[in-house]
Amino acid sequence: MKKLFIYIGLFLWGTLMAWAQEPFFANGADVSWLPQMEASGITFKDSQGQPKDCLLILKELGMNSIRLRVFVNPNNDKTSGHCSTEETVAMALRAQKLGMRILIDFHYSDSWADPAKQNKPKAWENLAFPQLCDAVYQHTHDVLSALNKAGITPDWVQIGNEIPGGMLWPDGSTQHWNQLAQLLNKGYDATKAVNPSIKVIVHVDEGNNREKFNAFFDQATQHQVRYDIIGLSYYPFWIKKDYTETINDLETNLITLSKKYNKDVMIVEVGGEVSKIDNTFQLLKATLNAVRKVPNHRGLGVFYWEPQGTQSWSHYSLNAWLENGQPSPALDAFKN
C-alpha cells in the first residue's frame, strides 16, 4: 500500500510539473474600439445579463491577452480614429490590472493600415527615406517607452499591420524590398532597445494562403529582416469560403512556416459572422486547434479581432457580441 501511495504521489507530481512547464498560450482579443464604445454609452453585460467591465467579461470567457492598435496622429472619428499613444497606455493598464498580457500593433499611419492601404502619417509624408527610417524608430521607441514608464512591458509588438504589400507606401512597398527591410528592422531595433524580451511580430493576411506567405517571408529572409514571430490573419468570410474549406490549408501553413523559417507563429486576427453563432464557434475551435498542433509549442495563440464591436455601433459584421449587450456564445470556444 505504501508503494502505491508513492507511485500515486510521483504521478501527481509529474503531472503538476508538466502543467507548470506548459508554455503560455494566448487566448486573445483586439479591443481597440472599447474606449470609444464606452464613451458613446455602450453597456456590456455578461452571459447572465449583468452589466460588467468588458475586459472582465472577456477574461471570464477565457481571454488572457489583449491586442491594441496604435495610430501616429489620429483624429477623433469614433471608428477610424483614436488609438493614440496616451489612449493605448490607458487601455494597456486596464488589461494588465486584470492579469492580461499585451500585444501592441503599430500601424505606422494616422488611421487604418491594411493590404489595400498603407498610408504614411501626414507628418511623415515629405520625409526623405533616411528620415522616414528614423521616424519609425522614434515612434516605436516613444510608444513603448510610455508603456514602460507606466509599468507595462508588452509580450509582443507588431511592426506593421497586414503588410503583404509592404508598409509606408511607396517607400516601403514590396516593390522596394531593400527599403521595406530597413523600415522593419528599425521597428525591431527600437522595440529591443526598450526591452529585449519583447517578441517582434511581422504580420501578413490570408493565413491559409501558403504561396503568399512563402513569397513574403522568402524575401524577408533574403533581405535579412529581423523578427521573432510570424503573425497571420484568418478570415474565411473575406475570401467567400467556409472555414471547412480552408482550415487544413491554415494548419499546413502554420506548421510549414514555423519549420521553414524557424519561427513561432500566431493568429493575430480571426473573426466569423456574428449572425452565424455555431459556425463561428466551430471556426474558432478549429483555429485554436490548428495553432496548438504546431510542433514544439511554436503556435503561440489566437486573437479575435474586435469581438466586443457590436454591429449597431461598428457596422462590422464579424464581431462576436449580441445586440442585447451580451457576448456571443461563439466566444465559448476560448474557454479551457
Image: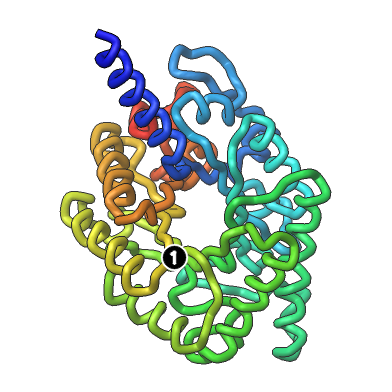
Considering every residue shown, the one lying at the far right of the view is: 149
Please identify the quadrant where the C terminus is shown.
Answer: top left
Residue placed most toward the observer, 234 or 213: 213
Q: Residue at x 80, y 45 (%)?
A: 150
SS at badge 1: strand
Q: Residues within 10 Å of mark 1 (few under 14, many from 20)?
A: many
Q: Is residue 41 left or right of residue 219?
A: right
Q: Is residue 89 above or below residue 252?
A: above
Identify the coloring.
Answer: rainbow
Relative to 135, 107 lies left or right: left
**Front position in the image: 5 or 70:** 5
Q: As displayed, is residue 274 above or below residue 218?
A: above
Q: Is residue 163 visible?
A: yes
Rendering coords of residue 310 (x, y %): 48, 35
Q: Residue at x 42, y 56 (%)?
A: 266
**Which x, y percent locates residue 36?**
66, 40
- Give the residue drawn at x 71%, y 74%: 136
* Pick the front one: 334 or 309: 334
Residue 3 appears left or right of 33? left
Who's the residue at 34% across and 25% down the image?
10
Residue 52, relative to residue 249: is it above or below?
A: above
* Residue 217 on image: x %, y %: 41, 78
Q: Report if residue 311 is visible in the image.
A: no
| Residue sticking out furthest to the left | 245
- Is residue 98 depicted above or below 155 in this figure? above
Numbered circles on residues, count: 1
Identify residue for label 1.
230
- Which quadrant would residue 111 be assigned to in this image? bottom right
Residue type indicated by callout 1? Ile
